[in-house]
Image (cartoon, helix red, strand yellow):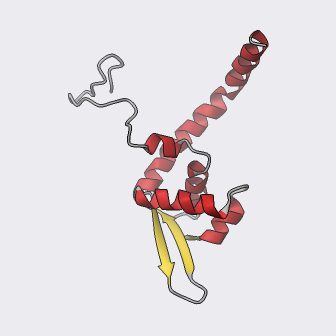
Amino acid sequence: MVSKISNQADDGRHFQPYPSNGICGKLGDKWTAQVIWHLSLANGRTLRFSALQSEIEGITHRMLTLTLRNLERDGLVIRHYFPEVPPRVEYQLTDMGSELLQVLESVNSWIWKNLPRIEECRRVYDDDNQ
């Protein structure tokens, strides 16, 4: 447990609430959660790049490439390259990527639980600030 005042964990360690290492930004981008979600649906198997691209509506080839590279760099995704003609590339969540999925599911649950309240707050705010 973390004290809101001291940012100190129960074991005495100190840390910043949001590390400045870029991970929070990546997790909050438009595509990362969707890529992780779709890879999780493969249930431990691999998915081809083209399958991911066709399943994620609106993602470009370039954005999927960048997102997968970042996830691979952070250790959340494994890239399997097969030197065939034409070359085949498949992706799979690592154990750490699967752990992250559990966190994203919690956030998703929170969003669905609070979405009506959020929409009402937005409506009131927008009405008061026109």
| Camera-nearest residue between 74 and 106 | 74
Taking the view exactly as shown, the residue that stands out farthest to the top is: 128
Measuring from the top left, give residue 116's x and y in whole percent: 72, 25
User: Residue at left 46%, top 40%?
Assistant: 24
Q: Quadrant of the rendered structure where residue 61 is? A: bottom right
Residue 86 seen in render: yes
| Camera-nearest residue between 93 and 86 | 86
User: Residue at left 29%, top 31%?
Assistant: 15
User: Residue at left 36%, top 19%?
Assistant: 4
Q: Quadrant of the rendered structure where residue 67 is? A: bottom right
User: Residue at left 57%, top 83%?
Assistant: 87
Left or right of 24? Residue 33 is right
Q: Determine whether 129 is above or below 118 in the image.
A: above
Q: Quadrant of the rendered structure where residue 28 is? A: top right
- Marker count (numbered): 0
Measuring from the top left, give residue 36's x and y in whole percent: 55, 55
Measuring from the top left, give residue 74's x and y in whole percent: 41, 55
Q: Determine whether 19 is above or below 72 in the image.
A: above
Taking the view exactly as shown, the residue that stands out farthest to the left is: 12
Quadrant (top left, top right, bottom left, bottom right) of the C terminus = top right
Measuring from the top left, give residue 121's x and y in whole percent: 70, 17
Residue 45 seen in render: no
Quadrant (top left, top right, bottom left, bottom right) of the N terminus = top left
Q: Determine whether 58 is above or below 80 in the image.
A: above
